[in-house]
Image (cartoon, rainbow, N blue to C red):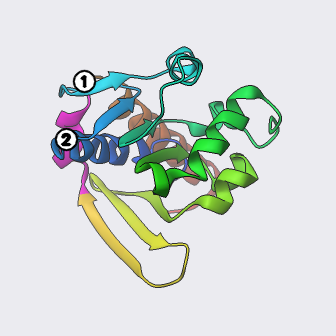
């Protein structure tokens, strides 16, 4: 299963990823992720870890990859890179291997087309103010379409850094400046 979590900077993508990572850990799945998270049970992930797993001859089965800023691993402009090719081989076989991918990106078009075509679910995040995130969850087959608003504070304990809070405040300040400069209320 491949799930893409999309949204502009500060929209809550990383918090949604943290919640999904925790859920995968709780169900006993081997989870490779990029922290920092405030809970245990996940294995640190980066390019070297992935290439090491591939080079070791280990079959990647029954695990999950929770990758923030996924375009840094399979950018649409680098389709021929070794990293892109290896990830593509694994993602197109994700169901057979029982491998789940949770990927954040600003927009699905930024990641490799072969990955885009294999996506099962999309979650679009949007900050709506008042400490809330609007989530739009839908499957790529058109069977269902869900919307929900969540309290940011509910998931903040899952991350160990204040980077997220700083990013949200920065985005809100930039938006306020643009609105006042351009005469919007």
Q: CA distance from mark 2 to mark 1?
A: 22 Å
Q: Residues within 10 Å of mark 1 (few under 14, many from 20)?
A: few
Is residue 139 depicted above or below 129 in this figure? below
Magenta extent: 151-159
Residue drawn at (31%, 70%) of the image? 148
Whichever of callouts 2 and 1 sits on the residue coming sooner in the sequence is 2
Q: Which residue is mark 2?
A: 28
Residue at (45% x, 61% y) in the render? 123
Where, quadrant-wise, is the N terminus in this rendering? bottom left
Residue 95: image x %, image y %? 47, 57
The residue under the point 80% across, 39% down is 79
Residue situated furthest bottom in the rendering? 143
- Percent x, y for residue 174? 54, 40
- The mark found on residue 160 in the picture is 1
- Compared across the picture, whether 78 is left or right of 147 comes to right
Q: Position of residue 183 (x, y in %)?
A: 61, 58
Above or below, 56 relative to 73: above
The picture places residue 52, in percent across and down from the top left corner, at: 54, 16
The quarter of the picture where residue 73 lies is top right
Give the secondary structure at mark 1.
Answer: loop
Q: Nearer the viewer, mark 2 or mark 1?
A: 2
Query: Can the viewer see residue 33?
Result: yes
């Amino acid at each position: 299963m491949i799930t893409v979590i999309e949204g502009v900077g500060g929209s809550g993508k990383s918090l949604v990823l943290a919640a999904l990572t925790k859920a995968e850990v709780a169900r006993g799945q081997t989870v490779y992720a990029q922290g920092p998270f405030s809970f245990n049970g996940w294995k640190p992930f980066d390019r070297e870890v992935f290439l090491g797993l591939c080079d070791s001859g280990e079959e990647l089965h029954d695990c999950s990859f929770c990758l923030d800023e996924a375009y840094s691993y399979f950018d649409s402009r680098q389709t021929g890179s070794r990293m892109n090719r290896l990830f593509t081989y694994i993602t197109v076989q994700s169901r057979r291997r029982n491998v789940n991918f949770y990927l954040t990106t600003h927009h699905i078009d930024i990641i490799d087309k072969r990955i885009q075509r294999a996506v099962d679910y999309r979650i679009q995040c949007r900050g709506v103010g008042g400490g809330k995130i609007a989530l739009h969850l839908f499957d790529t087959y058109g069977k269902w379409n869900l919307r929900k608003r969540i309290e940011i504070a509910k998931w903040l304990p899952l991350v160990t850094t204040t980077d997220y809070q700083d990013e949200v405040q920065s985005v809100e300040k930039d938006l306020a400046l643009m609105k006042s400069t351009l005469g919007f209320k």
